[in-house]
Amino acid sequence: MVQYQPARLDAAFAALSDSTRRGVLARLGRADASITDLAQNFQMTLTGMKKHVAVLEQAGLVRTEKVGRVRTCRLGLRGLEEEAAWIERYRKIWAERFGELDIVVEELKQKEKANGRKKRG
Amino acid sequence: MVQYQPARLDAAFAALSDSTRRGVLARLGRADASITDLAQNFQMTLTGMKKHVAVLEQAGLVRTEKVGRVRTCRLGLRGLEEEAAWIERYRKIWAERFGELDIVVEELKQKEKANGRKKRG
DNA sequence: TATATACTGAACCATATGGTTCAGTATCAG
DNA sequence: CTGATACTGAACCATATGGTTCAGTATATA
């Protein structure tokens, strides 16, 4: 059983609720970047970008390290396991509640392709 | 390819960033409820709960209908497909970037069990 | 040493959020 | 008609958010 830590989920979902921050995550997925890099990339002041990075850092999604003048930003050590788990749980509830199993089915199709015959036979 | 609508993701993730609202979704997953029900359930004024419901409604996660005096709240017509897709995409990037493929592997295990032989052979 | 670069912190601003109270309006029960 | 119930809207409050500018500090470069 996954144990949900409310404050953690709060922080992560809040961090993800801003398109600039989602963009920063995508950007850092391609390569590490300095605050200056990110600020230029998203057309924002250094100070503004610093704040976004701080939000991502507090949510554990980004970590940073300052060497000399430059603070390098990288993807954080944790992924989005809890968040994914929460959402998946919701999606199952939702699908059950509506009896519209399309979504779940679509997801399971690949598995079914493989295992389906067992049941069919 | 999934097309991401920033404003929609903003609204949904923002809606999910509050534990009361996540609780409301879980609650509505079990059964429809009135504003009064929810307010009692989460120890809050009607007005306060109304606002939370409004946030969820705007994000498309809840829909409501007023009959007589009572506004009944139900799960919305859309699930969290986009949000799940965004998170899964991030998780893949994250896993690739770290070379720690455990997460992806764990997810793909079932599929691989099925399709693996094709590649192996 | 002088200058440019990279960040940082404080202060400010407008708006949003999460909650409240209070004063309604609308509906249902008798 | 009377009263209770269920919601609604306005107003208020404290705090957070997303951004800015401005004035630093620290580091690299010439």
Image (cartoon, coloured by chain):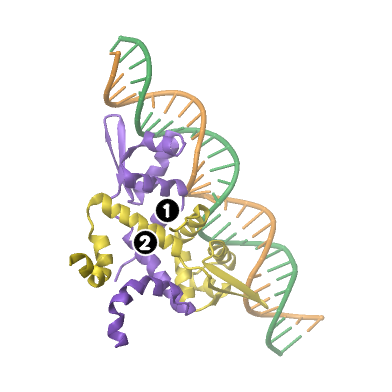
Chain colours: A purple, B yellow, C green, D orange
- Quick one: B43 or B50, which is closer to the camera? B50
Residue B8 relative to residue A37: left or right = right
Residue lying furthest left in this view? B121
- Quick one: B42 or B54, which is closer to the camera? B54
Q: Position of residue B8 (x, y in %)?
A: 51, 57
Neighbours of disc 1 within 10 Å: few (<14), some (14-19), many (20+): many
Task: Determine the image quadrant of residue B106.
Answer: bottom left
B85 to A118, vertically: above or below: above
Q: Secondary structure at mark 1?
A: helix
Q: Which residue is mark 1?
A: A16
Q: Which residue is mark 2?
A: A83
Mark 1 and mark 2 in contact (Cβ < 8 Å)? yes
Q: Position of residue A36 (x, y in %)?
A: 38, 33
Going by the numbered disc 2, the residue's amino acid type is Glu
What residue sits 52% from the left and 53% below the top? B7
A57 to D5, vertically: above or below: above
Instruction: Please state the chain letter of the residue tagged with numbered disc 1 in the rendered image.
Output: A
Task: Determine the image quadrant of residue A9.
Answer: bottom left
Instruction: Please state the chain letter of the residue tagged with numbered disc 2 in the rendered image.
Output: A
What residue sits 38% from the left and 68% below the top? A88
Q: Secondary structure at mark 2?
A: helix
> Do the dots labelled 2 and 1 sit on one chain?
yes
Neighbours of disc 2 within 10 Å: few (<14), some (14-19), many (20+): many
Separation of disc 2 and disc 1 at Cα? 10 Å
Q: Position of residue B16 (x, y in %)?
A: 45, 61
Q: Which of the numbered marks, if any, corresponds to residue B86?
A: none
